[in-house]
Structure formats: structure tokens, C-alpha cells
Image (tube, helix red, strand yellow):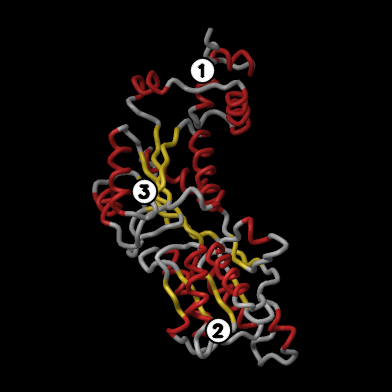
């Protein structure tokens, strides 16, 4: 025999509340207190309660579905972001349909078409270009959507991103303060806001200190990947004047760079300083100890989902542009220069 489905009445009995109160708590009704909502939602999860979306939709004429498109679920940052979005959506009585796009515009279009056919009420894009006709078209139609870890070039629509410009500025400025001058950057594709903004932060830090920006030291890869970091690090270190330090656009690029340097018998940080971006879990491994920039994927997911739900409810009078604060995480991959230069230049001391 199949197990009996948990109902609102079952939850109400267990919570010692009326069925109407439990229903309102599950649907995030404003008249229900936060503590009661949290208690009911926790109880619902523990008892295996799942709402009857079909019946609920017939009453409300809503599907209670959100769509999410991310760059790549295999990337731990996007996995954490997705989990946060899913948890927040479920707390508000919505369910999430999710898929990865590999930042392929054609794949994105097909996925959005599929999500629209099943009736999603709003979309979160954690995968789009600076200039993205698909997202622009949805905005023109007034469809509720949110960008997470991405933005459009003209800052249209709602988005929540980390301040990537400032994050890159922080980590490059840290290298400069340690005494590095010839600093390379391995960046992602120019069509992504994360890549463009981190490059801008690199430029601002270098220009502020009056350092030459050698275009030979800036390499652009098609993906944020270990392979990209590995390939371009080997090219950089074969230059007549190789870099003293390398800033990689994300931590997985930095891991690839670290592998290339090891194969070339170059030590980090004694021979080459190395920094990344994102503070992936592997960055703190004892054998890696990568200096990087952390960003809060969970907070980004929560903020993105809540703003999208406000847009769906018609409670968003103007576009929301949210910049989250980055944090420099100093480890052991770029400290050698400071120890080797007891008399740093004025204005550049730590």
C-alpha cells in the first residue's frame, strides 16, 4: 500500500494550530508571524508535506513555479546559489525548475521556451551575456525576472551581484602592496559582466598606482576553467618578461595556473604570486592556500528570490540593483614579495 499523503489537517494537528493558520503560514501570509511561519515550514519538511500544486493553482490561477538558469551546476558557487534560491522559494510556497546553460544563448532560448510552456511565473538568470537579446525581450514584455551574479550592460532590470569591480581592485591592490609590479590577468570572456567587471577592477588598481598595463599580460579565455588557467599560465611564463604575479578571474582558473607553474618547476609564491576569485572551498586546502575574494552565494540567492517574488506580486515599483560587498581572503599564495622587500616604496607599505 502507498503511504498516506500528509495534509494540511495533519500539519495543523501536529502544530496545534488551525488548518487556516497552517495554510497561511505555508503561503507566507503577512498576518502570520515569522516564528510561526518558520515552525510550520520546518514541521512540513519533517513530515514530508508537499502541496497539491494542481488544486492550489485551480483556486488561485497561479502555478507557483519559478525558473532558474545557471551557468554550470558543477561549479560549487552555482551549486550553493541554486540551493539558496530553492530553499527561499520553498519557504514562500514556490517550487523551482532549474537547468544549466553553459552560457550558450541557443540553449538558453530553448530552456526558457520550455519553462514558459509549463507556466513559470518568474525567471532567475544566473547565466546571461552583457548584451542578451533573450533577457532584453523578456524585459520588454514585462515578464518578472531577476539576474543573479550577472547584469546587463545598460543595467536594465533587477539584479543582485557582488561588487566585482571592487573585489578585483582589492586583490590586485593587495599584490601591489606586497611589492609586485608586473601583474598578469587571466580573465573570462568579455561578454560576461563578471569577467568585464573584474577586468575593470584590475585596470583601476594598476592605474591608481601608476603601473604600466602591458596588454601582453592580459589573457582572455572562452571559459572560467582550470584548462583556461593552465593554458594561459604556460604562455605567460614563456614571455621574455614573464609576470611576477598572476590574477586569475576565478579560483578554478587559479588551480589550473598552479598546475602549470608546478610543471614548470616554479614555486608559489616564491617565484610567482598567484590570486584567484570566489573563495571556492578547495582554495583553503592546506596544499593550495590561495589568496582570493569571497562572495556570499547564499545571500545572493536569498535576495534574488525575494526580489523576484516581489516583482511577481506587483510590489516592485522600480528596478532593484543590489551590490553585495566582497571580502579579501589572504592566504599564502602571494606573500613572498613582502618578506623579500623590507623597504617597500612609500605609499605601498602594508
Q: Name the residue under label 3.
A: 317
Q: Which mark sits nearer the N-terminus, 1 or 2?
A: 1
Report which quarter residue 12 is drawn in: top right
Where residue 148 appears, as percent x and y from the top left, is 44, 53
Where residue 40 appears, as percent x and y from the top left, is 59, 25
Q: How far apart are marks 1 and 2 (CA)?
A: 66 Å
Residue 319 falls left or right of residue 20? left
- Establish if 3 lies above or below 131: above
Q: Which mark sits nearer the N-terminus, 3 or 1?
A: 1
Cβ–Cβ under 8 Å for marks 3 and 1:
no
Report which quarter residue 312 is drawn in: top left
| SS category of the residue bearing label 3 | loop
Q: Which residue is drawn at 48% across and 37% down?
A: 89
Dot 1 alpha-carbon crowd within 10 angstroms: few under 14, some 14 to 19, many 20 or more: few
| SS category of the residue bearing label 2 | loop
Q: Distance between the residues labelled 3 and 1?
A: 31 Å
Q: Nearer the viewer, mark 3 or mark 2?
A: 2
Where residue 94 appears, as percent x and y from the top left, is 45, 33
Q: Which mark sits nearer the N-terminus, 3 or 2?
A: 2
Q: In which quarter of the image is the C terminus?
A: bottom right
Q: Name the residue under label 2.
A: 243
Q: Which of marks 1 and 2 is in front?
A: 2
- Establish if 254 lies above or below 240: above
Report which quarter residue 242 is drawn in: bottom right
Cβ–Cβ under 8 Å for marks 3 and 2:
no
Q: Distance between the residues labelled 3 and 2?
A: 49 Å
In front of the other: 188 or 134:
188
Q: Mark 1 points at which residue?
A: 20
Dot 2 alpha-carbon crowd within 10 angstroms: few under 14, some 14 to 19, many 20 or more: many
Amino acid at each position: 500500500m502507498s503511504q498516506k499523503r500528509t495534509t494540511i489537517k495533519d500539519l495543523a494537528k501536529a502544530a496545534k494550530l488551525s488548518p487556516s493558520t497552517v495554510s497561511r503560514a505555508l503561503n507566507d501570509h503577512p498576518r502570520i508571524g515569522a516564528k510561526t511561519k518558520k515552525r510550520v515550514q520546518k514541521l512540513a519538511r519533517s513530515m514530508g508535506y508537499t502541496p497539491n500544486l494542481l488544486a492550489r493553482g485551480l483556486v488561485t490561477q497561479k502555478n507557483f513555479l519559478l525558473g532558474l538558469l545557471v551557468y554550470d551546476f558543477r561549479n560549487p558557487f552555482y551549486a550553493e546559489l541554486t540551493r539558496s534560491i530553492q530553499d527561499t522559494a520553498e519557504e514562500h510556497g514556490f517550487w523551482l525548475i532549474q537547468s544549466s546553460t553553459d552560457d550558450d544563448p541557443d540553449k538558453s532560448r530553448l530552456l526558457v521556451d520550455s519553462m514558459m510552456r509549463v507556466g513559470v511565473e518568474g525567471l532567475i538568470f544566473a547565466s546571461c551575456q552583457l548584451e542578451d537579446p533573450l533577457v532584453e525581450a523578456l524585459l520588454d514584455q514585462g515578464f518578472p525576472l531577476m539576474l543573479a551574479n550577472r547584469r546587463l550592460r545598460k543595467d536594465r532590470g533587477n539584479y543582485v551581484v557582488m561588487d566585482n569591480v571592487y573585489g578585483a581592485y582589492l586583490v590586485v591592490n593587495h599584490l601591489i602592496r606586497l611589492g609586485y609590479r608586473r601583474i598578469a590577468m587571466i580573465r573570462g570572456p568579455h561578454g560576461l559582466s563578471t569577467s568585464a567587471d573584474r577586468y575593470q577592477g584590475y585596470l583601476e588598481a594598476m592605474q591608481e598606482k601608476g603601473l604600466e598595463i602591458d596588454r601582453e599580460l592580459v589573457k582572455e579565455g572562452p571559459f572560467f576553467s582550470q584548462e583556461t588557467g593552465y593554458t594561459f599560465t604556460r604562455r605567460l611564463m614563456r614571455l621574455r618578461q614573464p609576470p611576477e604575479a598572476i590574477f586569475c578571474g576565478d579560483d578554478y582558473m587559479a588551480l589550473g595556473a598552479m598546475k602549470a607553474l608546478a610543471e614548470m618547476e616554479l614555486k608559489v609564491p616564491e617565484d610567482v604570486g598567484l590570486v584567484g576569485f570566489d573563495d571556492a572551498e578547495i582554495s583553503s586546502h592546506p596544499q593550495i592556500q590561495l589568496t582570493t575574494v569571497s562572495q556570499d552565494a547564499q545571500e545572493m540567492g536569498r535576495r534574488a528570490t525575494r526580489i523576484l517574488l516581489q516583482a511577481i506580486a506587483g510590489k516592485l515599483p522600480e528596478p532593484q540593483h543590489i551590490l553585495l560587498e566582497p571580502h579579501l581572503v589572504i592566504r599564502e599564495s602571494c606573500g613572498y614579495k613582502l618578506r623579500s622587500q623590507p623597504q617597500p616604496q612609500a605609499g605601498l607599505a602594508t
